[in-house]
Amino acid sequence: MATATAVQPNDKKAKVYEGSKDPKRAAFYDKISQRDMAPLWEVLKDLVAKSPKSIAAPAIWHFDEVKPMVEEAGGLLTAEEAERRVLVLENPALRGQSRITPSLYAGLQLILPGEIAGAHRHTAGAIRLILDGDGAYTQVDGEKTLMKYGDFVLTPSWTAHDHGNETKKPMIWLDVLDVPTINFFETAFSEHLDSAVQNTKFTDNDSLWRYGSGVLPDGTDTKKESPIINYAYERVRPILDRMAKTDDINPYHGFRVRYANPFNGGWSTPTMGAHLALLPKGFKGQPYRSTDGTIFACLEGKGQTTIDGEVFEWGPRDVFVIPSWKQYSHKADDQSVLFSISDRPMQESLGLWREMN
């Protein structure tokens, strides 16, 4: 039978609190600190805040500035050496933590012609947004899909996946994973497959044709994750044009669609939710805020986003992040398309998500 280990005194001095000005309190705080305890009343106002105070900062990565660095990494090591050759987009307020928001990781991945990023799987769910190049592939649990600009590609939790580039040009995409969340819960697992490349069972975006047309194969066993691995931009983008002709515009987001799970109409992944929005030329969005820190990527056009009074200019392929509960508004100089992704599904499932406009 296991016995509990008694907490032993240590030499840790208590943190200096506001109440430490009182010598009796300061002595008491030092005493309880020796037993790894602290006074709740000194930290309660920060522990239970009246409104969110994000530890992250707004930031932007201009693609034309960072692309040469991504390409330079291609000359320093191979895809095999790196396993995944990625430049992590580190939030400037969270440096050294591989986080773009407190709950999400993001990076720019490069795969050169002829390279293979070997098959592995992990509990973290992943998405890819193709930013530069066409024709490289991702293979997920035996389904091989060719990727083009603007495609939104899923790698659900614990699915085997490998990447390859059989074209003659490099390809760069944005990776977003829920790694920080998985690590917070201490539930991270991963493994490499025996072969660098999986056996291909399906091709030609089979899952999109099979599940993305409003019908399901009879006897389909529905599950949480979307069965579609590639939401092709060439199929999603025209929907925005149709909406612009017939629908009322959202004063905060423009004409916007949500990437959905065809099984249940929910989010495309249980941890990350994505949108695609069309902002007409001259669009001036009204101020908006929400609790989900959000990553944006511009796919078309140019404009500005004002975040808590700070203006961020963006154009094609630029990536920027808006932390939780920061007020922001978009302005489009030209007709623009913005992709966005956040941890909203997790917040909604816990009853925590809020917005204010």
Image (spheres, grey):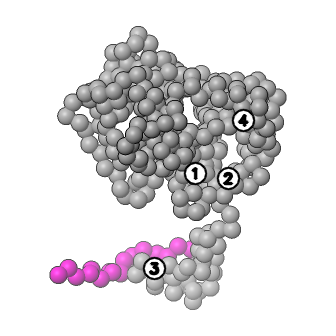
Q: Could you classify mark 3 by the number of other residues whose Cα lies within 10 Å: few (under 14), some (14-19), or many (20 or more)?
A: few
- The residue at which mark 2 appears reads as 290
**Disc 4/disc 1 C-alpha distance (Å):** 19 Å
Q: Amino acid at mark 4?
A: Phe
Identify the residue at image location x=61%, y=51%: 292
Q: Could you classify mark 1 by the number of other residues whose Cα lies within 10 Å: few (under 14), some (14-19), or many (20 or more)?
A: many
| Nearer mark to the viewer, of 3 and 2 | 2
Is 187 placed left or right of 229 in the picture? Answer: left
Give the quarter of the image for residue 34: bottom left
Whichever of callouts 4 and 1 sits on the residue coming sooner in the sequence is 4
- The residue at which mark 4 appears reads as 255
Q: Amino acid at mark 2?
A: Ser
Inspect this view and state whether residue 263 appears: yes
- The residue at which mark 1 appears reads as 344
> As displayed, is residue 115 above or below residue 326?
above
**Disc 3/disc 2 C-alpha distance (Å):** 35 Å
Whichever of callouts 2 and 4 sits on the residue coming sooner in the sequence is 4
Which residues are drawn in magenta? Answer: 1-16
- The residue at which mark 3 appears reads as 37
Identify the residue at image location x=32%, y=80%: 8
In the foreground, 227 or 211: 211
Identify the residue at image location x=42%, y=74%: 12
